[in-house]
Amino acid sequence: MKSKETVISMSKICKSFPMEMGGQQQVLFDVSFDINVGEFVAIMGPSGSGKSTCMNIIGALDTATSGRYELYGRDVTNLTPDELALVRNEYIGFVFQQFNLLAKRSVLDNVMLPLMYRGLPYSERVRRAREMLVRVGLEKFESYLPNQLSGGMKQRVAIARALAGNPKLILADEPTGALDSKMGNEILKFFKQLNKEMGITIVMITHEFDIAKYADRLIHIRDGRINYDGKIPRDERKL
Ligand SMILES: Nc1ncnc2c1ncn2[C@@H]1O[C@H](COP(=O)(O)OP(=O)(O)O)[C@@H](O)[C@H]1O
Ligand SMILES: [Mg+2]
């Protein structure tokens, strides 16, 4: 059992996928790191290096082939799909590159989504979702549909949705990948603010050093192995 301050603890995580022609393709090799409460960490690596595979394990969307993974001191390694879903809903707010909003539901409905399984009365869910929309500056847009908003606004709705469940951890996979650089910077500054002012732990996946620089710590993956874990280096060529 790790200390309470540890959010994510990965120990010698390996992941293999079965190949169509038979045999296995190993994608992660003995990946180990701890992430503590309040950290803002970027996981960076070239395309195909295993970032999304790693994020799926962190996010309890998939399980490792071997190794041990603890989330908030709780062993997630051998949970059933239903148990994984509960862990996700309780601990993690997800932000994806393509926003993943429900196109036919209002902004408010989208933000209320993670509260559905919390046993809260409808009025309480509405109140909390509105509070989150104020936080991302979109309170005037609650009855809009996602496709009436700009990309940056959609990502802010997604962040409000991630925050609504009061997560201990925000997990963002290429969160600015679908945005122009101005909107992308706004989203990154907002993450920084959430991290510094609210102490929310953030793990952000990216293939770009200029985006990783917004974090305080960089874990660099190459070919499924960690080859750097530490402060943001001054120069990408150090990786
Ligand atoms: N579900 C899967 N089945 C088989 N191979 C996979 C699966 N997911 C990922 N891979 C393989 O694992 C490697 C790493 O992929 P991924 O984790 O998506 O990398 P990244 O996110 O860094 O681009 C790739 O070679 C990819 O083809
Ligand atoms: Mg990926």
Image (spheres, rainbow, N blue to C red):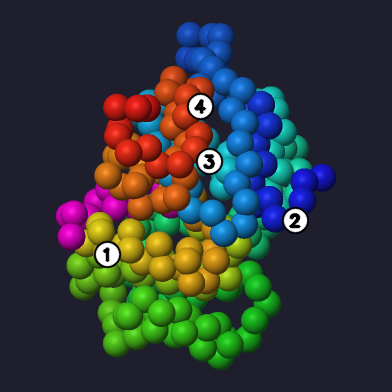
1 or 3: tag closer to the N-terminus:
3
Verify CB contact (< 8 Å) between mark 2 and mark 1: no
Q: Residues within 10 Å of mark 2 (few under 14, many from 20)?
A: few
2 or 1: tag closer to the N-terminus:
2
For the question of whether residue 129 can be seen, the reply is: yes
Q: How far apart are marks 2 and 1 (CA)?
A: 32 Å
Verify CB contact (< 8 Å) between mark 4 and mark 3: no
Q: Distance between the residues labelled 1 and 4?
A: 29 Å
3 or 2: tag closer to the N-terminus:
2
On the image, numbered disc 4 is attached to which residue?
226
Disc 4 vs disc 3: which is toward the camera? 4
On the image, numbered disc 2 is attached to which residue?
4
Relative horizontal placement of residue 3, taking residue 58 as reference (left or right): right
Q: Distance between the residues labelled 4 and 3?
A: 16 Å
Asked if the beta carbon under badge 3 is closer than 8 A to the nearest atom of ligand 1, the reply is: yes
Q: Quadrant of the C terminus?
A: top left
